[in-house]
Image (cartoon, helix red, strand yellow):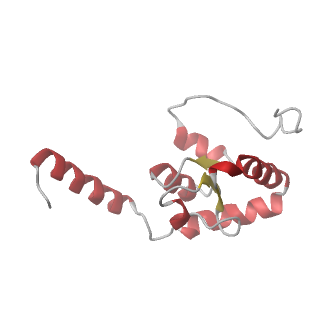
Amino acid sequence: KISELGLTNSVLLLGKRSDTLILNSMSDIAFSRGFGTETIEHLRAGLPVFSFNTDGAAEIINNGVINGGIFDFSQKEQMASEIISLARDRTKLDMLRSNAARSIAGRYTFQDEASVWRALYRKVICNDSY
């Protein structure tokens, strides 16, 4: 399908990798399964993120305007079309890339994430409601 769409120079399927931070820096667009650490990491790296409309994803991804796109599960074809269109439109892609990191600046910091995980571990391990 990639070659049928004329995207062989734009799309690489790499499979499971452990060097995702390095790969992020070489990517133009990211896909996320919803709101989570991977979405934040992609945006911090300056990547527009496309996701399905799951709990939390709309909190951080501004659909098609600022930093990516959100689609319902039934809209797989529309999501694919938007990604293909973006891969062909460098001006819009560059705009979304420049907005991505700015869109979460000061929000969802590493310290915030560490505090959430620390509280969760404390609650589970120590049976503490802290």
- Horizontal side, residue 84 vs residue 14: left or right: right
In this orientation, which residue lies closer to the viewer: 26 or 72? 72
Q: Position of residue 85 (x, y in %)?
A: 83, 53
Quadrant of the image occupied by residue 3 = top right
- Horizontal side, residue 56 vs residue 76: left or right: left
- Horizontal side, residue 95 vs residue 39: left or right: right
Q: Position of residue 16 (x, y in %)?
A: 55, 29
In this orientation, which residue lies closer to the viewer: 5 or 8? 5
Residue at horizontal 59 percent and vertical 45 percent from the top? 24
Q: Position of residue 120 (x, y in %)?
A: 23, 52
Residue 67 seen in render: yes
Residue that sits furthest to the top in the current view: 15
Q: Quadrant of the C terminus?
A: bottom left
The vertical placement of 37 against 100, above or below, is above
- Horizontal side, residue 92 vs residue 73: left or right: right
Q: Quadrant of the N terminus?
A: top right
Quadrant of the image occupied by residue 67 = bottom right
Q: Position of residue 68 (x, y in %)?
A: 66, 60
Quadrant of the image occupied by residue 17 = top right
